Amino acid sequence: MVMKGGSTRTLGKILPLQELPPKELMDVLGEMYETLLREDRWPEVLAHIAELFEAADAAFLEWNDDFSGVRYFVSSRRAHTEESEVLFRNHYALLDPAAKLGREAPVGAAANCVDVFKPEFVAKDEYYQGFLLPQDLRYRIATKVRGAPDSAAFLFLYRREIDGPFGLEHMRLLSHFDPHLRRLAQLHAELRRLKSDKAEVADILDRQSTAFATVDRHGRIRTINRPASRLVIAQDGLVLSGGLLEAVDANAKRKLRVVVGLACAPAPAAQPGSVWLPRPDGKPPLVCVATPGKTGADRPVYAILAIADPLTSPPMTGRHLMDLYGLTSAEARLACDLAEGKSVEAIAAQHSVAISTVRTQLSATLKKCDVERQVDLVRLLCRLPSLGRLN
């Protein structure tokens, strides 16, 4: 990305090193870093940046690694609207002539678009004619703050036709922002990656048939998956009391506290333990196993609780069995019913078929799954990996 007068690195040398940015600049820089904690503040912060640059609008834009789409876009909305942001992401981002320049530019490069896109180009360009000019935006300056391999991020500032193009003084001011913008873009990308990783792990845990929770030594919940949350909400063996995960049964409550305390003891004294959790309505008790969590100098002590419900079988779909063993839909349905503990007679009654038909399907299923007995089939199915659906 070429800029009249050189890159931001060159422009930064125009100002004396002892000259500090004005207080307004320092305040805005502080607000920029606050967006790491509150990303919803971006429009407000960008509005302040726009004011510093005497701009009509400011936007932070992140293209994906191959510039085929926009990963992130937020503006001050002084000129852009929520609708125009959506329009930009879905259509005009791919037409922006700055994208091609941005792809080839090194991180830290800046440009005054008035030096790059001449009036005759603007008069014919769909991005300018269909998107920028209808919003009364004509001039832009930009700096590239993040590059490959993850994505390419830019700060854009816009001015109206009536205000005239940005000048060298604006490019000098932009040079003050450059190192902070690069660091901020890197931190935001890392935070989004961590949030994405956390969401993926939560998705995996929520799809398990086993209930999981992590608690501190007092029993205070740190994380909990959806099956465990369902038990707590229904007070089915477990209850949340004052923010602490406790057993409903008084005796089990005391035992659970002991087990959690042992799992959270300082290493090497920490040890696993287990406890039965009685349930209402005569249902079989839950099985709770506590295991010490991974410890370290920067990690708080916690225990991992795995809670199994004897009435809940691992989720398995017939589609998986059809793919793996070549079962018919009827045979796959039979296998799933058997894995849930149903008898041949109950399965026949449930589906209104003769017992002899079910036995014929069972024989074919055993042969395709290369097992000899019904118990071996159930054992095989229980060992298969499975993920439930999110309801």
Image: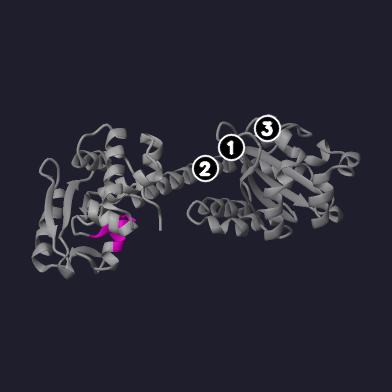
Say few, some or many: other residues with alpha carbon within 10 Å of mark 1 (under 14 / 14 to 19 / 20 or more). Answer: some
Sequence-first tag of 1 and 2: 1
Residue for badge 1: 151
State the residue position of label 3: 103
Residue range highlighted in magenta: 220-230
Q: Residues within 10 Å of mark 2 (few under 14, many from 20)?
A: some
As drawn, is 291 to the left or to the right of 369? left
The residue where tag 2 is placed is 189
Q: Which mark is residue 36?
A: none
N-term mark: 3 or 2: 3
Task: Please state the horizontal and vertical placement of residue 348, each as a whole percent of the image.
Answer: 29, 54
- Pointer 1 or 3: first along the chain: 3
77 shown above or below 325: below
Image x and y of residue 175, in percent: 66, 40
Residue at image x 38%, y 45%? 318
Can you give x and y, in whole percent of width and height, for residue 159 in the image?
78, 52
Image x and y of residue 269, in percent: 10, 43
Q: Are marks 1 and 2 in contact (CB under 8 Å)?
A: yes
